[in-house]
């Protein structure tokens, strides 16, 4: 991929980026202008999946998650084998509370690139929200192996440990299960019939 797709992750996009890399054409000091240029470029090159991917990054940086979702969905269709397109789509879905769709996109990204950090972060957050602290911790460990100082992964790992501790505390507070009550032996139907005859014979 070229600079359209690789240099514009939402966390790296700032209004001053264009001053340092103005040669990239679409980048400029004004994010709104960058969005307009990308939209125009998409009209001219509708088959270039890197353009909607870059547009999605711009929309994410502006907090326009619905618009980012649409752009990333287009990028994922045009770049089906690009892990970044799917992990970006997962991030937008997560921002909009669409956990199931986010999980599918993140898993697709990981299947294409097991080292896709953004996808692992999405999965870790989904596991945490579902109370699956072990799965969340596993995803965080994969991230921290590559970058031990990753702030997001460290925070989610702490949340996973807190969930685990809370679960252990709740288990200790639960009262022990009462022993099962003894069930009297079941009388045979023949004995019941005999007992009934005996009762009728007594005056």
Image: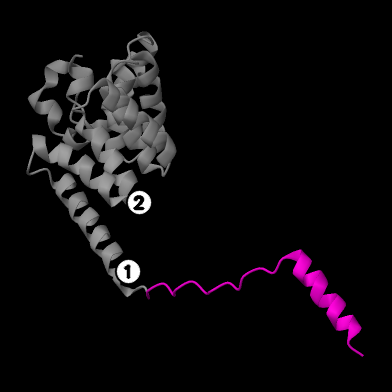
Quadrant of the rendered image containing residue 48? top left
Q: Which residues are magenta?
A: 175-203
Picture residue at 19% right of the left edge, 50% below the top: 157
Return the mark for residue 170. Answer: 1
Return the mark for residue 129. Answer: 2
Marks 2 and 1, the one that precedes in the sequence: 2
Picture residue at 37% right of the left edge, 74% below the top: 176
Which circle, 2 or 1, is nearer the viewer? 1
Quadrant of the rendered image containing residue 34? top left
For residue 83, above or below residue 91: above
Q: Tell me if residue 56 can be seen.
A: no
For residue 78, above or below residue 155: above
Q: Tell me if residue 203 can be seen.
A: yes
Looking at the picture, the colour scheme in use is one colour
Which is more toward the observer, 40 or 72? 72
Could you say where residue 185 lies in the image, as x and y percent from the top left?
62, 70
- Magenta stretch encompasses residue 187: yes
Quadrant of the rendered image containing residue 99? top left
Which is more toward the observer, 42 or 159? 159
């Amino acid at each position: 991929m070229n600079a359209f797709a690789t240099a514009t992750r939402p966390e790296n996009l700032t209004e001053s980026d264009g001053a340092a890399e103005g040669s990239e054409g679409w980048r400029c000091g004004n994010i709104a202008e960058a969005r307009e240029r990308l939209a125009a470029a998409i009209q001219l090159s509708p088959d270039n999946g890197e353009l909607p991917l870059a547009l999605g990054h711009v929309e994410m940086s502006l907090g326009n998650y619905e618009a980012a979702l649409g752009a990333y969905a287009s990028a994922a269709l045009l770049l089906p084998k690009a892990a970044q397109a799917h992990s970006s789509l997962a991030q937008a879905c997560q921002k909009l509370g669409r956990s199931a769709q986010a999980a599918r996109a993140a898993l697709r990204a990981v299947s294409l690139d097991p080292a896709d950090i953004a996808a692992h972060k999405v999965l870790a957050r989904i596991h945490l929200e579902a109370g699956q602290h072990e799965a969340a911790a596993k995803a965080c460990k994969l991230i921290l192996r590559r970058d031990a100082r990753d702030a997001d992964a460290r925070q989610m790992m702490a949340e996973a440990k807190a969930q685990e501790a809370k679960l252990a505390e709740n288990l200790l507070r639960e009262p022990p299960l009462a022993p099962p009550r003894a069930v009297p032996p079941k009388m045979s139907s023949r004995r019941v019939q005999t007992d009934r005859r005996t009762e009728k014979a007594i005056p």
